[in-house]
Amino acid sequence: MRTEPLIYELSKNGRRGCTLPDLDVPAAALPEDIIRDELRLPQVSELDVVRHFTHLAFRQMSIDGCFYPLGSCTMKYNPKVNERTAALDGFKCLHPLQPEDTCQGALRVMYELGDYLAEIGGMDAVTLQPAAGALGELCGVMMIKAYHSSRGDSARRVILVPDSAHGTNPATAAMAGFQIRKVPSNERGTVDISALESALGDDVAGMMLTNPNTLGIFESDVETICRMVHEAGGLMYGDGANMNAVLGRYRPGDVGFDAMHFNLHKTFSTPHGGGGPGSGPVGVKSHLEPFLPVPVVIKDKDMYSLDYDRPQSIGRLHSFYGNFLVMVRAYTYIRSLGREGLRQAAESAVVNANYLMAKLRSVYEVPYDHFCMHEFVASASEQKKLGVRALDIAKRLLDMGFHAPTVYFPLIVEEALMIEPTETESKETLDAFVSAMLQIDQEARETPDVVKTAPHEMPVSRVDETTAARRPNLAWTGE
Amino acid sequence: MLGVIGADNVDELFNKQIPESARFDAELNLPKGLSEQEVTTLLEKMAAENRSLKELVCFLGAGIYDHYVPAVVESVISKPEFVTTYTPYQAEASQGLLQSIYEYQSLVCDLTGMEVSNASLYDGGTAVSEAALMASSVTGRTKVLVSQAVHPNYRAVLRTYLFGRGIEITETNYKNGVTDVEAIKDKLDEQTACVIVQYPNFFGCIESLADIADAAHAVGALLVVSADPIALGLIKPPGRFGADIVVGEAQALGLPPSFGGPLLGIFACRKEHVWKMPGRLVGATVDADGRRAYTLTLQAREQHIRREKATSNICTNQALAALAATVYLSAMGADGLRHTAELCFHKAHYAQSQLINKTECEAPWSTPFFKEFVVRLSKSAAETNEKLLRRGILGGLDLGRYYPELEGHMLLCVTEKRTREEIDRLLEAFAEL
């Protein structure tokens, strides 16, 4: 495929892609001393812009175009009706600071969505403010910090994080000023209880736990873990990245989690947009409710309002109320599926993952070999012996019209291929993916170079990431 | 499928994994599912419970702006190839998005006068906060000086972000609508990591960045500037005055007000600090055949590689919003952006001078401003806004809510979308109050 020039390289003097009205008031004097005399932006027509971004779209894989079994990311199909509701003028063209009696519908969306999420997670209250999962985590651990400090318990400086955790967990705890203590996994891929025992102490503020964990395994000792952490005076934070597996089947709040976040852009089908905007609402039990970020949407009789009068609040985590239009999409999704639909989504997600695992097990090693939840981790350790690595398999899959699984994560599995099919894929799609994976295994044995030099059918061949990092070129300089 | 799996039924899959005592066996207390038609009707009804800016004439700004969004922006950011794709971890499958992010980074550098830009942060408030954390990391210092003329909500986010790390925040006052540079000099010391100001500031006034930069640099502190990207079409960029980190809220670049989100946090800095930057970066490189290609790069700063030693915990950002800004800036070009900024400037000045000359409003200070300005009212701001709303006008921000000393003052905003007829309606309404 032909390389697409940069938008700057399409520039021709005097072109513009948008018309603007003439000035209809008297001109005022400009502050001449600070008026800008240079600004290099592309000069392109509207058609130039349209063609350019259409060409870029051709060079892009997406869920609408292909199966996207990216583990831990829950790349389910995003129903189009969610886009339609989020585009309604009554939501889109709303100023966050307009009087509350002129935005009751928006506040109602937020209030009810908070209620639904609290019910789904078994929590008592929810904030929708965090703009993504990582900001939700920060919100959660900040509340844990504020909770301990409100009790004069300021010596708790450690957050426990399992070795299978997402990178955001330790990064978040560090951002909140905590030290991180790693808890190893046992041979079953779950938290090692005796290691947890020795990690606990007076200095532990809490533990961050993803359940099902990043191996797609339900932490069967979750109640014991919560009890142990609580007995040591710590609180439990749930990373809700994998909630899609357990909707209507298990609620973190029922087994002892004190706080958790939801990823609306995973579980609740709001599109990822190429890496955002997402939304990471946080649910808490009542003892953490006073620490929720301000403002909180409240309801009095039939009127909704924003409550700022919360003296123990951790403050704000967003300039306004979070990614509101993402909330509208998630609200639409939850109302569309309803209580039965959400439970069915989890069931199909788990069936699809187990089906793929069963089909692939004969040629790809599955290190933790029992039923899985919504995803599983395979290993390319057998293929590596033939010189073919997980990365090569990922790239070869692109040639076959499938997005790659997550590779090299979790860190505790060698040559990890983390596969999450989600509930929205048909058996035919899953079977086609299995065929592709089996073909790649065969190629690894017979024509390994085809796999090692993949992709061959994409707009570019293997991208040189080493050069990108050694000689960073991060912006166009005109050369 | 269950046969292949080796399970008798779906329940077995769950029950073999979730211990009985941890299971949720009841029915979720949620409404029943709705058809597409029903859910559309429901949401349309809820949307209609709001009075949108399609109906109200908006003179409210304060961080979220009613700028014109060209049709081409909506068209491009609705493309499913961009909407329904994930973070471009597989470079070969994501050349389109990666190239657009590289273009976004380039545009942000040009606009702000800086050398490197990341792929976006959540919003203006979190971008200011990340800048403070980065400045602390660059300088090894633990004090941050922030002007009271920075958006009050950004300062609130900053307090939350810095609480964890134990970084001390000192607020510094404003005078005549701009940051008091002498006060900054008094408060700066060898432990100050950065000075944070906004440009134009929360009151719409244009800060004298050169003086503030000199004061900060004199003690080895960095200058962090939160800038309005529309204003940068008209006035000199912070990079020209020696800013070390330029952040800002870029909702104005092609995103509707959206009740405050999705927004777009821009983040740019000097090349020498790139390893301390938060967030994703895209770099240009080549593929195995030597063709130009793009990829995520310098990922060793990020949480998925560095874990607790990462520069930030950010993972998901505001990619689609960054694409909107890329399309907006491309379609506008320098001329279009300059024209937009000038329309804002002249219309805001027309509205301000007419309000001062023809109504009971007074100007509390005479500092140059861009598209927002403050007036002292003859009545309370709440009462004034109520009366405006009855005439279909969304009035300005009641500043007394954030600044007790500015009780009875209002922050008004005039963008390029406001016609003379609409501004005259505002003047008329004020005259009749």
Image (tube, rainbow, N blue to C red):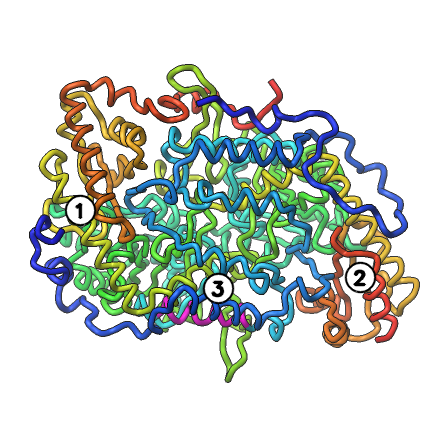
> Where is residue B224 drawn, in percent x and y?
62, 42
The label number, if any, that marks residue B422 in the structure image: 2
| Quadrant assignment, res A10 | top right
Q: Residues within 10 Å of mark 1 (few under 14, many from 20)?
A: some
Name the chief secondary structure element in magenta.
helix
Q: Which residue is mark 1?
A: A185
Q: Which residues are magenta?
A: A105-118
Q: Residues within 10 Å of mark 2 (few under 14, many from 20)?
A: some
User: Residue visible at 68% across and 37% down?
Assistant: A17
| Quadrant assignment, res B384 | bottom right
Q: Which residue is mark 3?
A: A293
A371 displayed left or right of A232: left
Q: Chain of mark 3?
A: A
Q: Amino acid at mark 1?
A: Ser
Q: Chain of mark 1?
A: A
The label number, if any, that marks residue A331 in the structure image: none
Q: Amino acid at mark 3?
A: Pro
Considering the numbered disc 2 on the image, is that residue within a helix, a strand or a loop? helix
User: Residue visible at 18% across and 31% down?
Assistant: A380
Quadrant (top left/top right/bottom left/bottom right) for the N terminus of chain A? top left
User: Residue visible at 24% across and 29% down?
Assistant: A393
> Where is residue B69 drawn, in percent x and y?
65, 49
Q: Nearer the viewer, mark 2 or mark 1?
A: 2
Residue A117 part of the magenta segment: yes
Residue A423 part of the magenta segment: no
| Residues marked 2 and 1, same chain | no
> Where is residue A269 drawn, in percent x and y?
38, 55
